[in-house]
Amino acid sequence: MVERTPVFNFFTHLILFVGFVFCVAPFAIVAIAASHNLKDVNDVPMSLLPGSDFWVNIKTAWTTADLGPKLLNSFIMAFGVAAGKVIISALTAFSIVYFRYPGRMLIFWLIFITLMLPLEVRIVPTYAVVANVLEPYQAIMDLTGLSWLIEKVSGVQVQLNVGLLNSYPGLILPLVATATGTFLYRQFFLTVPDELTEAARMDGAGALRFFIDILLPLSRNNMAALGTIMFLWAWNQYLWPLLITTDQSHAMAVTELKQLIPNVGGAPEWHIAMAGTLIVMLPPLIVVVLMQRWFVRGLIATEK
Amino acid sequence: MASITIRGVKKNYAKTQVVHGVDLDFASGEFVVILGPSGCGKSTLLRMIAGLEEISDGTIAIDGTVVNKLEPRERGCAMVFQNYALYPHMSVAQNIGYSLKVAGVPSAERTQRIQAVARVLELEHLLDRKPMALSGGQRQRVAMGRAMIREPKVFLFDEPLSNLDAKLRVQMRSEIRKLHRRLNATSVFVTHDQVEAMTLADRLVVMNGGRVEQVGTPAEVYSRPASRFVATFVGAPAMNMLEGTVTLDGLSLLGDSRKLNVSRTGLAVGAKVAVGIRPEAVRMVAPGTPGALAATVDLIEELGAGRVIYVDLDGAPFSIVTSETVHPEPGSTVGLQFAERDLHFFSAETGGRLDVFKASVPEPAL
């Protein structure tokens, strides 16, 4: 169905253009609102011609919400999640695809099940675990009477307690522990020809050597794709950071945006809020632009 | 340089057995070709020697050491794969040198050895290229270089030429042969291409259905095929086979429609046999010549140097290879003549060779 008439061309372009406007309009409005002053931004309807206070608003938003450290926090967390995901996914997929051991399929399905249990579903137990990582072990010891025994014998009361609230590991680890990436890698590893594996074996490379020298370089497109997706996903996390960062020093940029949203009774400073939004949107945008080439290749093409 | 001893080797996949007990001895420095149709277990056997497949039963020994439990790298084998299996992200030099890198050979020595191998294979100008930027023949050479650099005791080739075009295949064939003469390592070469097998082999192993049918020099296998399968598999066009029954004065062929006079064969009268005649052993004569079989010409294939004439012998297909410039019309009748010594007899039941013209054949019990 390839048609090339001027009318048809016009309509396809029209549809494309409408779609484009539909996608971009909200961003344009955010950017325009961010350039107005307090009076103009509250006009009804708001003027769609950009105002002149863009940089002033950006600066105000930056200082009001203290975005510098928050962006750094967000970056550390998003980067940590992306890196953790890539490493864990590659390793688990490597194990599932390349090794035959009892319980392999069981483990595969257990990993699969985590897809159905996103963080939002298991947020309460996850919070409990993060609040005290050793809690499950404590429970096991209490149940089996082990802690009672230890207390009787040594007189020491067993109280395991390692909390990860208000820490980077606490922010990052629960977000790393899902299976999405494992499947992406599994699909990729299945396309790697067996002869390559055998050639590496004949060349004397062990499993780890093969993984590092052959598989990882071959899967760098996948890594870029997964890393980018996970970076964006982690950057945009709201609920989890909000829950576990009670301390301002670990607050995320995305959660701190609410500082800029006008309170009831306060001045309706929407221009500042919009400016802050723009700032917070920028790092993911940069990541996407930088990674785009790899990213697209990793998702669509198999390297031949 | 190493000998390979294979004793009672079997291979099972779950419940199916694909190799049913193979015994073979390869002498040190020998070039052995394993020939067989696809699915005959030849690649499986090779991969068991390499250590890529587990040996279900029996033993394989290299240089007297049983290697059943050894990792591929500990067996001293190098392998050239059908699809080359080059590492796509590494340059030619890195591909060739990878095994040395894994073995921890210092970089300077590595470079030197890569250079030496590249010189032999005429790859020097390609060392910085990626495999993607190479032609099929060049990739094949890189794959051989990767095997050579380890100076292995045993070279294993798994249909390495089947992805090349016809001309390149002939060229690589002679290169492999030259390389073998130069390195003199024991080589095992698996192929389904009989021309490749005949030209390369010191000794030929013909396999079918997970069993060894015959072991011998290419000339032996060609001139004295041990079974009906070998007879029809080796040689192109394939050997003509005619079903027949032994009679008092010779053979009656094709459901008694044809008679063939042969001297006493030592076979019991009434025995069912298959008679094989190589297409190139058949002479075409004028129809009606005494002792000749009359046949109808079906089709003529011109080969330049000669021609293949397909004829119809009462419904049985039959081919003749001749270098004479004869062009019988399709549909015309010709006479077929052949010498008694060119006939091969096979048991109709077992397919095994019946040696009927030996001097030691006893007088038939009449």
Image (spheres, coloured by chain):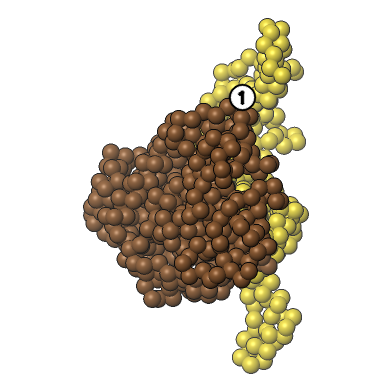
Q: Position of residue A63 (x, y in %)?
A: 54, 37
Query: In the displayed structure, would residue B58 be above or below residue B267?
Result: below
Q: Total of numbered circles in the picture?
A: 1
Question: Which residue sits at x=39%, y=49%?
Answer: B199
The answer for which chain carries disc 1 is: A
Residue closest to the eye, A283 or B164: B164
Q: Residue at x 30, y 50 (%)?
A: B178
Give residue A264's position: percent from left, percent from top. Answer: 75, 36
Q: Nearest the camera: B94 or B225?
A: B225
Figure quadrant of residue B152 = bottom left
Residue A256 image point, x, y percent: 63, 43
Q: Quadrant of residue B172?
A: top left
Residue at the extreme top: A6
Name the colour assigned to chain A in the rendering.
Answer: yellow
Q: Is B26 in front, or is B251?
A: B251
| Residue at image mark 1 | A31
Which quadrant would residue A52 be assigned to in this image?
top right
Task: Say if residue B321 shows up in the picture.
Answer: yes
What percent of the width, then of the height, locates residue B146?
Answer: 36, 52
Q: Tell me the quarter of the image containing the N terminus of chain A.
A: top right
Q: Looking at the image, can residue B279 be seen?
A: no
Left or right position of A197 against B30: right
The residue type indicated by label 1 comes to Ala
Q: Residues within 10 Å of mark 1 (few under 14, many from 20)?
A: some
Is A147 positioned to the left or the right of A303 in the image?
right
Q: Residue furthest bottom?
A: A153
Q: Secondary structure at mark 1?
A: helix
Residue in view at x 62 percent, y 38 percent: B295
Which of the chains is brown? Answer: B
Q: Residue at x 48, y 46 (%)?
A: B281
